[in-house]
Image (cartoon, coloured by chain):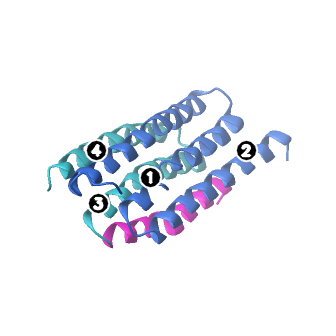
Amino acid sequence: MTVLAVVSVALLWLGVVLELLCCAGVLVMRTAYARLHFTAPAGLGVAAVALAILVRQGFSLMGDKSLLVAFVVLVTAPVVSHAIARAVWIRNGRERP
Amino acid sequence: MNEWILAAIVLLVAGLVPVGIAMLTGDVMSAAAAFGLAGPLCSVILLLLAEGFHRQPFVDLAVVLSVVSSGGSLVLARFLEWGA
């Protein structure tokens, strides 16, 4: 097993663990505000998996597209979290959480 | 079965199922918050399956899903602001 293969597998399971932690947080928390703390970091898990594929494949079509997925999720996940938090705030009568 | 498919199965069983349970429990806004996590989770599962089965075109599904799911979550949040 080469060094790159070890790094790839390590990044893969790091991403999986990050995603599982986010899922556990969403499941355990009860309010929408508390759950939103665990939705934005999911982009880090996607980025770790995309880096694992990039390390394994190099800058091929697969590696480039996985990087594109990671970029889109990293950019849009905080925006989605903010939009949902704003919707909760408006539905609650614009009160402080 | 290689480690990519194993990781996809782990995320499907231990990741997507709890998020589905979280979506089915609680009020509407809590479910919307859980729905915001389901999109990136499905994207990474599709990435892992494409890499695990060595099917390069399947990555396009993950690319499209990552864009469409974020747009869908934004539209859902906008509708929920109006009190749906």
What type of secondary structure mainly makes up the magenta span?
A: helix
- Mark 4 Cα shell of 10 Å, populated few (<14), some (14-19), many (≥20): some
Q: Secondary structure at mark 3?
A: helix
Chain letter, colour blue in render: A
Letter of the chain that mark 4 sits on in the rendering: B
Residue at horizontal 59 percent and vertical 41 percent from the top: A47
- Quickly name the residue at label 4: B72
Q: Earlier in the sequence, mark 4 or mark 3?
A: 3
Return the mark for residue A8.
2
- Quickly name the residue at label 3: B29
- Mark 2 Cα shell of 10 Å, populated few (<14), some (14-19), many (≥20): many
* Residue most extreme to the right: A2
Closer to viewer: mark 4 or mark 3: 3
Letter of the chain that mark 2 sits on in the rendering: A
- Is the residue A68 above or below the residue A17 in the image? above
Q: Secondary structure at mark 1?
A: helix
Q: Verify whether residue B38 appears in magenta.
A: no
Give the spatial CA distance, label 1 vs label 3.
20 Å
Question: Whole-percent x and y of residue B34?
Answer: 38, 60
- Mark 1 Cα shell of 10 Å, populated few (<14), some (14-19), many (≥20): many
Closer to viewer: mark 3 or mark 2: 3
- Quickly name the residue at label 1: B42
**Amino acid type shown at disc 4:** Gly
**Amino acid type shown at disc 3:** Met
Give the spatial CA distance, label 4 vs label 2.
32 Å
Give the spatial CA distance, label 4 vs label 3.
15 Å
Give the spatial CA distance, label 4 vs label 1.
14 Å
Please report contact status of discs 2 and 1: CB closer than 8 Å, yes or no: no
